[in-house]
Image: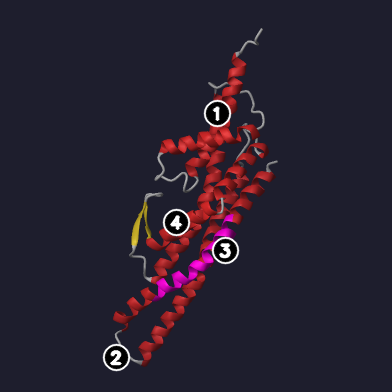
Amino acid sequence: MPSQITDAMIIQWVGGFLWPFFRVAGFFMAVPLLGSQTLPANIRLLLALVVTLAILPMVPDVPQIDLISLEAFLVIAQQVLVGVAFGFVVQIIYQVFALAGQMYAMQAGLGFASMADPANGVNTTVMAQFLVIGANLLFVTMNGHLALIQILADSFRMIPIGFSGIDREFFWELVNLGGWMFAAAFLIVIPGITALLMVQAGLGIVTRAAPQLNIFSLGFPFMMTFSLLIAWIGLTTLTPHFEHVFEFGLSFLNDWIESRA
């Protein structure tokens, strides 16, 4: 005679899928490329469902919580917060290249060349958008999305579903990560900015040696051409910089997850 299906079993089955789903959905809501506004919401929801089904066998047993209760809403908020925090760390990694492009464009006189960023809904320089697109391509080429999904799956073992998750120390580490973002962006553009400074110093020497030259009419197009040449040469270092920045972000997430074990 088949065993009878009880309400507790239904709650356990539904909760076993819903609690991981909210963490994965929060991650896809905040992570760049997959969580951008250019990707329709129904596609992001479908991706969250597929990823949840894929990592569900690796999720440990979830606590039995009444689906219509205050505890359930607290667990949902906690899981969404964990997922959004993971996606925000990846967002900071991407903003390193956006900030580097902004810095270089402003110093090279290319700040007037701006365009609408469809992912963030703001205007950014073309140089910053170019570096972000390059980071997206490298991210997919190096299977960065698979590495992030693996970290997300491991987080269910280290940070089990419940009322514990994000602590105060993690928010302070996120603040420090913002300072690291500015430092990493500056290290990416400092060779190009140094080269531009040397060119400007050379133009100043030419102006003193030949005052009859109109430096304002000659210097601006020359600086623009030279800045684009420097940017083209600097593309060879984009891949090593991305590997370093992305490995730092992954190690940051791994270290924080392992510290919760």
Crowd tier of the residue under label 4, counting other residues whose Cα lies within 10 Å: few below 14, some 14–19, many 20 or above: some
Residue at which label 1 appears: 18
Q: Position of residue 36 (x, y in %)?
A: 43, 46
**Image marks 1 and 4: residues in contact by CB distance under 8 Å:** no
Q: Which quadrant of the rendered structure holds the N terminus? A: top right
The magenta span reads: 226-246
Residue beneath disc 4:
133
Is residue 166 found inside the magenta-colored segment of the image?
no
Badge 2: how crowded within 10 Å, few (<14), some, or many (20+)?
Answer: few
Q: Which residue is mark 3?
A: 240
Q: CA distance from mark 1 to mark 4?
A: 34 Å
SS label for mark 3: helix
Amino acid type, label 1: Leu
Mark 1 and 2 residues: CB-CB less than 8 Å, in contact? Answer: no
Query: Mark 1 to mark 2: distance in Å?
Result: 75 Å
Which of the two discs, 1 and 4, sits closer to the camera?
4
